[in-house]
Amino acid sequence: MVDRHRSVDITDQKNLAGHRPNTTLLIIAPRREPSAEELAAYRGFLNDGNTIFLADDFGNGNAILAGIGSRIRILKGTIASLDRSWSDPCSVIVYRTAEESPFPLPGEMVLNGAAPLEGGSPLMLTSIMSWTDANGDRRLNLGEEMGTFPAMATEPVGAGTLIVLSDPSIFINSMYLQEEAGNNRDMIRALVTRDGPVLIDQMNSRTAGAGGLSEILHVIRNTVMIEIFLLAVLMLCIAWAWKTKQV
């Protein structure tokens, strides 16, 4: 979806300097705490009038948020809801709550395993039939009160804009290609086709990769290859056993 002529992989914080306003940086599933130099580059990027879109649900993004001076935080726990798309209560439906947003948002989206957010201005909220599943049992327990929880929020940082989504899995093919995820695709399309270049963070994101491929795709590819190899070995063993039995 991202035109290769408009997108740039960022592997060094020095590459964040000198971009014209309205450039968007995607930080998807940050995997480690950033260095002081990287945080300074993020702040400088925002101060140039650009946008950072950070998607995280494990809380590793909090180090980036604190380092750039944001008030938004990713909280522990997973949002569950009776208002869901699939049988899993963590496949929550969230709804647009802001009349104005940094880019066009659909009326609703389907998330999977999102975390609650605090701080900033909410852009997408769960319905009131939702709760934070603190113990991971997918059930509403004593002490887990129902309410609305923000899953996407925004705030100005310097001269730029920060957007935080508490579910990076919407960028994974298995979620992206689901029939129910049509609105998710619309959101991603609106994000990456904004007026301005798109930068993809490869310093801290789990999309950073081996040999130019993303870490996620690398793992999936190797898992599939292992499964194919084991299946081939199994078939050879069955063929050998059948041949031995015939003899």
Image (cartoon, rainbow, N blue to C red):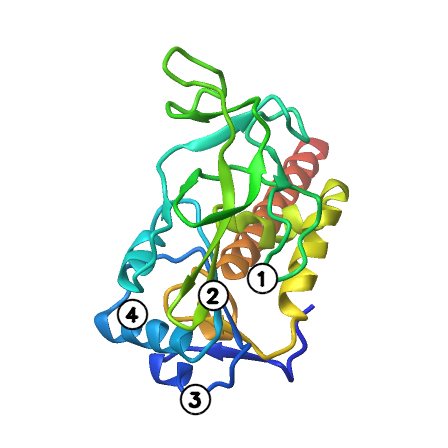
Q: Which residue is mark 4?
A: 39
Contact (Cβ within 8 Å) of mark 1 with mark 2: yes
Residue at mark 1 to residue at mark 2: CA–CA distance: 8 Å
Label located before the other in sequence (1 or 4):
4
Residue 118 in the image, given as x and y percentages of width and height: 39, 42
- At label 4, the amino acid type is Leu
Q: Which residue is mark 2?
A: 161
Task: Kindly state the secondary structure of the residue where label 4 is placed.
Answer: helix
Judging depth in this view, the residue of 243 and 121 nearest the camera is: 121
Residue 89 in the image, given as x and y percentages of width and height: 57, 25
- At label 2, the amino acid type is Thr
Label located before the other in sequence (4 or 3):
3
Contact (Cβ within 8 Å) of mark 3 with mark 2: no
Q: Nearer the viewer, mark 1 or mark 3?
A: 1
Judging depth in this view, the residue of 53 and 136 nearest the camera is: 53
Q: Residue lying farthest front?
A: 99
Contact (Cβ within 8 Å) of mark 1 with mark 3: no
- At label 3, the amino acid type is Gly
Label located before the other in sequence (4 or 2):
4
Residue at mark 1 to residue at mark 3: CA–CA distance: 22 Å
